[in-house]
Image (cartoon, rainbow, N blue to C red):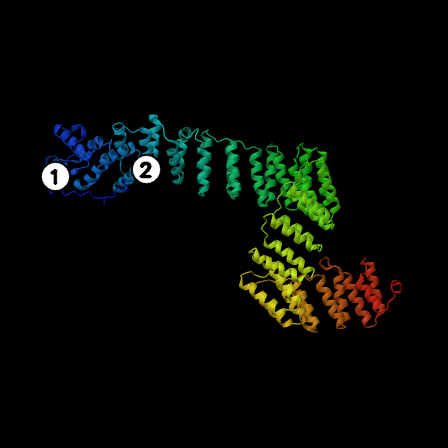
Amino acid sequence: MFSAFSSKLVFKNPNFPSSSSSSILKHLSSKTPNSLNQFDKTLITHFSNVFLQQNPSLINPQFLSKFQQTHIEPILSNLKCNPNSAIHFFRWTETFINSPHSLNSFSALILVLLQHHLYNDAHNLFDKVVSQNGNDFDLFTPFSTKFTTFNVNASVVYGFLIEGFCRNGMVDKGFDVFVYMIRKGVALQANVARNLLRNLVDYNRVGLIVDRYIELCFVLKGQGFCVYEFVIEGFFGKNEVEIGLDFHRRVTLRRFPPNIVLCNKILKALCFGNKIGVGVEYFNVVQSVGPKVNVITFSTLINAYCKEGTLDKAFELYNTMIKISVTPDLITYSILIDGLFRTGKLEEGSKLLSVALDSGIKLDVVVFSSIMDAYMKCGDVERAILVYKKMLDENVSTNMVCHSILIHGLSQNGQVAEACGLYGQVIKRGYELTLLTYSNLIESFCQLRDMKGSFCLYNEMIEKGHEPDATFYRIFINGLSKHGLMNDAFRVFFQAVSRGFRPNVFIFNVLMNGCYTLKRSREVVKVFILMGMYDVNMDKVTYTVLIRWIADQGRLREALLLYFQMLKTGCLPDTITYCTLINGLCNGKNLTAGLQIFTLMQRNGVVPDIAIYNVLIHGFLKESRSDSAIELFNSVLQRGSKPDIITYNTMICGYCCLTMLDDAIKLFSKLRKNQRNLLPDVIAYAIVIRGYCKVGKVSEAMMWYNHMLKSETLPDAFLQQIIDEYHLDNNTMKS
């Protein structure tokens, strides 16, 4: 309606006398409403009636010639029942008088607008006053003397002034209005108080906040709004940490401290908001000036340190607790024990567990489950079971989570029978199995090749209303694929699809890899077509499986084309992809292309691993390029790469094929010295024994065979084949 009140808004009417300039301005005076005579009152009534009719052409020229700025306020008062007429009149005066309005005129129109709840227009007019007069003006007095005349509630008027001053950066003036309201007992709206407080924080007026802290708290009491929390979070939020800490000190020293529950809440927010540094400073100030910290305060900061991985600081705080006689509780010990186990400090965790139990703390199932999970992840199943028994000894009620951890850990460590036995106990206890537990159990049954049991669990899970997710299907289908049960894997896949499951790339990769492993080429193609039907994009694993499958068929050109297509789609190959492609090229007697791909891999920033070096060394040896193989092997050692048993076996085999037995034995001896815990395996012994046999050195072959037996390495079918090939009597060799 009255947006912006810009001076550009000019009201013009052809019926206005043309002499309304210099001659009329001579009559302008500084008369106050109290000094108005009868003529002035008649003039005011006349103008009021004219603008109530919205027809300025009815203005009497005699009255127009006597019109003065002091008449504006009483006329607006007469027009207060009709805001449109008041606005019309105010705009007309801007054009007619051709000089800025007085503060009294502005305040009168603002009061009219407030009376009719035209708050946006009132705010725009206030902003115009500021732009016209700057920051040095007194608008408070005109308002405070006339709001009753305009029938506007004092709380609304003063609240409007506070918001207007704050909006224009005059926070101190807004605060003065607030103080005046407090003294006069005028109620302030909560939203206005919040806005004032927000501006006081934004302008760092901590002194003003502290001076009127009680009044601010009183105004906002019952509004679900905490002044202390708002202020300190405001300062911390804009990184004015010192000001925020100073606010806490000053409020506390004036004997208006917050309670420790609120301080703990703020400390927790800081720690969870990745502001642990600020949290530590806040903790130190609270501990110094109050309120008195408690176990929750310490536990909150200890938890933050543990999640950050700085356990030394967490235990410093724990020791401080003990010194000042703050007794750690269940939460404190749970956090510290969990932190130790998560970082692999199992012994320290076990000791602290004993301390907690000895101090009378009754740990809950969550803590025990966390400890069992840590031991299971480290492969220490025995200690995990001991913790489980300890939990039972402490009469701690078990739940499905702890049993799921045990079942999963036993399954992963190959103790499938034990996992299934625990499943029987779970059923007897009447627990409802979770989807994760079903997944672990089905994986266990797959490892036992008990597919009947797997499908029984699967059907039971469906009957009990558990909806399998992508992880479950990946585990189940992968278990079936690993054991060559591709028909069952496809059956589960299509059942899942019929239930509305949308397969992802991981499921397709499992199916494709299973078909490849079983040399079922047609199924590989079918899976590839299915991916397209379900609009699933290939990832690097998909490309790697396809490249391996194509290369194994000797279609090296197509394998290379697929590799370059992979690059074109933006799917970046990893070391496994490159190793697969290079191995295919080397096996296809195209070492040159393999070396070119190796160079391209390095240019693309992919660091080769030892598996790729093994492939290249083997490729060099296959093409009788022993010098290149030896050079690459030495280069691997010089670069600090760590050869594995395959690297050593490949080189030993190469030396033996080249009848360089002395070099082969030197390398074998180096391997026997337990370098990096690598020990010769039966293949290494077989290669050396075969090498000696080929050159007729049977006694040396028998010596190395005896070495193998002493190292408790058992012969395999390959070694037995060597013995049979060279007509060696096994009993003679042992003797």
Q: Which is more N-terminal, label 1 or label 2?
A: 1
Q: Can see residue 505?
A: yes
Residue 423 lies, in percent from the top left, at 72, 41
* Residue type pointed to by label 1: Ile
Near mark 1 (Cα within 10 A), the count class, few <14, some 14-19 or many ≥20, is some
Residue 329 or residue 153, whichever sits in front = 153
Near mark 2 (Cα within 10 A), the count class, few <14, some 14-19 or many ≥20, is many
Residue in the picture at 26% in, 29% down: 150
Residue 222 lies, in percent from the top left, at 44, 28
Residue 253 lies, in percent from the top left, at 46, 31
Q: Can see residue 575?
A: no
* Residue type pointed to by label 2: Gly
Q: Quadrant of residue 238?
A: top left
Q: Quadrant of the image for the N terminus?
A: top left
Residue 18 lies, in percent from the top left, at 11, 43
Q: Which residue is mark 2?
A: 164
Left or right: 421 with respect to 114?
A: right
Left or right: 404 with respect to 89?
A: right
Asked if residue 198 is positioned above or below residue 633 in the image, the reply reads above
The kind of secondary structure element at disc 2 is helix
The kind of secondary structure element at disc 1 is helix
Q: Residue furthest top?
A: 185
Residue 462 or residue 2, whichever sits in front = 462
Q: Which residue is mark 1?
A: 24
